[in-house]
Amino acid sequence: MNKLKLIGPFKQLIPMTGLSLKGAISDSELIIVEDAGILIEAGKIVAVEKFNELHRKNSQAETFRLQGDHVALPGFIDSHTHICFGGSRANDYAMRNSGKTYLEIAKAGGGIWDTVTQTRKASKDALVKSTMKLANRHLKNGTTTIEVKSGYGLSVDEELKMLRAIKEANDGTDADLAATCLAAHMLPKDFDGSAKEYLNKISSELFPILKREKLTNRIDAFIEESAFSESQIAPYFQKAKEMNFDITVHADQFSTNGSKVAVDFGAVSADHLEASTQKEIDLLAGSEVIATALPGASLGIGCGFTPARQLLDAGGALAIASDHNPGSAPMGDLLTQAAILGAFEKLSNAEVLAGITFRAAAALKLADRGQLAEGFLADLSIFHSSNYNEILYNQGNLKPCMVMKNGEMVYNKHK
Ligand SMILES: [Zn+2]
């Protein structure tokens, strides 16, 4: 069954190899393989080199010969989404645009709590379906790995419903879904007790089930005035660490504190960072934490972007994710948002592409993807173009014409 496959020729193939995980990257550092082919076996890349060479040496391989000019990039990785949810927040969005703040809407009973109510009303099967639908949309747009958070259940049973739905959705889509438990999204309004008691209940009752059912190995928390303080989260993360969960943090969205918690607990990533000052930037840059910009949230809320340029110049590792969620980031278009962040923050194309490929893979601790090289998954975003610079220049309007996941063509516009 493990037949060799050869795909190409690609006018340009950008393997995203040989680049550093941290710090600025100039476009001149990008390797471009011209007239390239990719040899694939059992879903993984066996070789990347000139198509004609590969074809000559592997005449027995099943060959997908491309017509016209194409550019190949690694399948994109969206390391932060909330695509498992019920309902819509179109009314919140309208309220916010007519002058109410994010915190005012939350205090008025809208915001995250509204989505919690709608998600609790939805059956698990309905959540599986809606999550698969959004995942398939991302996949068609070139994103082959998608992180998906819980966090709209906010009780042991309802968080389990979400995480089981994400697991089922993962089985039903060609994209890889990486689940994260975000039970610490906010203190649920119907919880009869303190934040400390809620977090204690989640960590003692939910965490062991997450391990037993292999629902996720990642624990996230929202550190913010409207959610949890650093001192409330500390024992929760301590418990998560003791149980060998990876930690990730919603940090510095409106106020700073979250990034310090992320660094102190050795989080894999600190996401948002719109409010980070030079102090937090230096702290993150001096750590192993992947700083993740979420331009979709800035666009949805109408606030400034994560200081991506400063983070990179300070030596930080920058991933870029969509934060696709029903409230603050409904667009859910990673490539468009990454292109816009690049224009506003003056990022090189290499830095933007790194942020949605190998640097995002690092934020999910997935060492098998995000680059096109021997041994990596054959996950590809393929564009009808002769010049990779066209992709970000078109600001997301140039979509992939083909997407490959684990060596299988899962989307082909030409068919
Ligand atoms: Zn988020």
Image: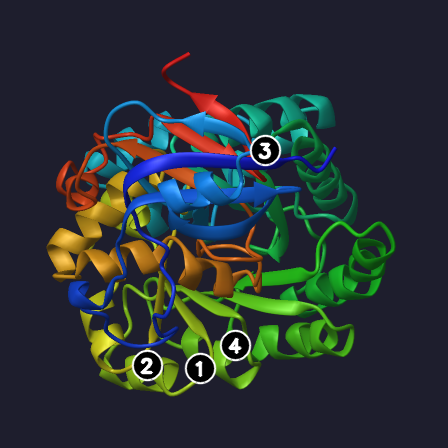
Residue that sits furthest to the right in the current view: 212
Q: Amino acid at mark 1?
A: Lys
Q: Is residue 249 left or right of residue 241?
A: left
Q: Is mark 1 within 8 Å of ligand 1?
A: no
| First in residue order: circle 3 vs circle 2 | 3
Neighbor class of circle 4 (other Cα within 10 Å; few <14, some 14-19, many 20+) is some
Give residue 260's quadrant in the image.
bottom left
User: Which residue is at 67% across, 65% downward?
Assistant: 194
Q: What residue is disc 3 on?
A: 60
Residue contact at pointers 1 and 4, CB within 8 angstroms: yes
Upstream in sequence: badge 3 or badge 1: 3
Provide the residue designation for mark 1. 260
- Whether tag 1 and tag 2 are in contact, CB under 8 A, the answer is yes
Disc 4 versus disc 2: nearer the observer: 2
- The answer to whether mark 3 is within 8 Å of ligand 1 is no
Instruction: Confirm if mark 2 falls within 8 A of ligand 1.
Output: no
According to the picture, the residue beneath numbered tag 2 turns out to be 280
Between disc 1 and disc 4, the foreground one is 1
Q: In this figure, what is the number of numbered marks?
A: 4
Q: Is residue 241 left or right of residue 291?
A: right
Q: How does the figure colour the protein chain or chains? A: rainbow
Q: Look at 38% across and 88% down and name the residue there.
A: 286
Q: Position of residue 358 (x, y in %)?
A: 43, 60
As measured in the structure, the alpha-carbon distance from the residue carrying label 1 to the one carrying label 2 is 7 Å
The answer to which of marks 1 and 4 sits earlier in the sequence is 4
Residue at the spot of label 4: 230
Q: Residues within 10 Å of mark 3 (few under 14, many from 20)?
A: few
Q: Earlier in the sequence, mark 1 or mark 2?
A: 1
Badge 4 amino acid: Glu
Q: Is residue 270 visible?
A: yes
Q: Secondary structure at mark 1?
A: helix
Identify the image quadrant of the N terminus. Answer: top right
